[in-house]
Image: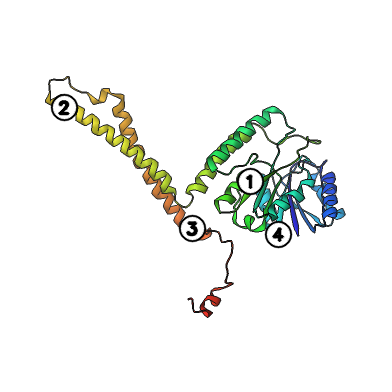
Amino acid sequence: MLSIVIPVFNEQDSLEELLTRIEQVAFQHGYELDVLLIDDGSSDNSWAKIEQLSQRFTWARGIRLRRNFGKAAALAAAFERAQGTRVITMDADLQDDPREIPNLLAKLESGFDVVSGWKKVRHDPWHKVFPSRVFNSLISWLTNVQLHDHNCGLKGYRREVLNEVLLYGEMHRFIPVLAASRGFRVSEIVIEHHARKHGKSKYGVERFIKGFLDLMTVYFLTGYGNRPQHLLGTAGLGSFLAGGLGLFFLSIMWVVSRLTSMDDVNLHERAIFYFCIVALLLGVQLVSLGFLAELITAQNRPTRKPFSIVADTKASGGDLQKDGLN
């Protein structure tokens, strides 16, 4: 079974055409469909339209959130209820083409766990395209997950990926990064992008501000989520060492000035003296913060396993004991 997850926010005019296109693709390729439409607090008639269409298209069902929780929450709600072994996500604005679904599935079957769409030719205004390209380059550089379009809504997943990736806030655009940090294989394919036919874009300038802050969060979680002291402690020790060496050097200068005929070195008149003190205190604070982060991480470790298993040759521990390998 193939699950298709479609977040909906004020897209009443595009839903019928989108489901019709999906039906055509499914009929052509013989897919057994499980389509979930998640109404993320729409203020138009999107939910009424979803109810109507779910009666016409029996393989489609709707989920209505109590208010607008954001795209990540909408996806998380659908992922919990999706029944397919392969899951496709796509936007409801008709800019994503359902005819790309077979291409995503073919890439998944070639051995990848996550396949992201790449809108190589975008039909969006330049003030939306240019910042997006800069942001995508920054994500690839920081996370080492080399994708041209991290924020593309058209993606394909194996079921096991979504069982291990935790979504909250605005983390939906970083699912490939989160999956890669768990050892899953990530790739991309070029997809066709269409101009918007109905409604208007839901994203503004604040999208990039929030995206950058989320990127910093993802970089920390994927690189140091289970060992925060390695980042905070390293920065703290570096700062403490720089401050300590600076004060040591200034102390030597002060002693030498006292033992020779040189003019007295008045430390309080030198800016570097205060920089060294600040660096020393900052180092202590960062190391202390690292210890607190380690305590919090240790308390939360039982809720999330620090590994990801791809295969197990024995179904249970009993089989191992039966073979004398206990």
Secondary structure type for disc 1 = helix
At 68% from the left and 31% from the top, the residue drawn is 128
Marks 2 and 1, how far apart in space? 60 Å
Marks 3 and 2, how far apart in space? 53 Å
Quick check: marks 4 and 2 in contact, CB under 8 Å? no
Q: Which residue is mark 1?
A: 172
Quick check: marks 2 and 1 in contact, CB under 8 Å? no
Q: Which residue is mark 4?
A: 85
At 57% from the left and 40% from the top, the residue drawn is 140
Which numbered disc, 4 or 1, marks the residue that appears first in the sequence? 4
Which numbered disc, 3 or 4, marks the residue that appears first in the sequence? 4
Q: Which residue is mark 3?
A: 301
**For residue 234, side relative to residue 81 (left or right):** left
Marks 1 and 3, how far apart in space? 23 Å
Q: Which residue is mark 2?
A: 256
In the displayed structure, would residue 313 be above or below residue 52? Answer: below
Quick check: marks 4 and 1 in contact, CB under 8 Å? no
Q: Residue 193 appears at what percent x and percent y? A: 75, 38
In the displayed structure, would residue 45 be above or below residue 184? Answer: above
At 70% from the left and 55% from the top, the residue drawn is 109
Q: Residue 178 appears at what percent x and percent y? A: 58, 49
Which numbered disc, 2 or 1, marks the residue that appears first in the sequence? 1
* Amino acid beneath label 3: Arg
- How many numbered marks, from 0 up? 4
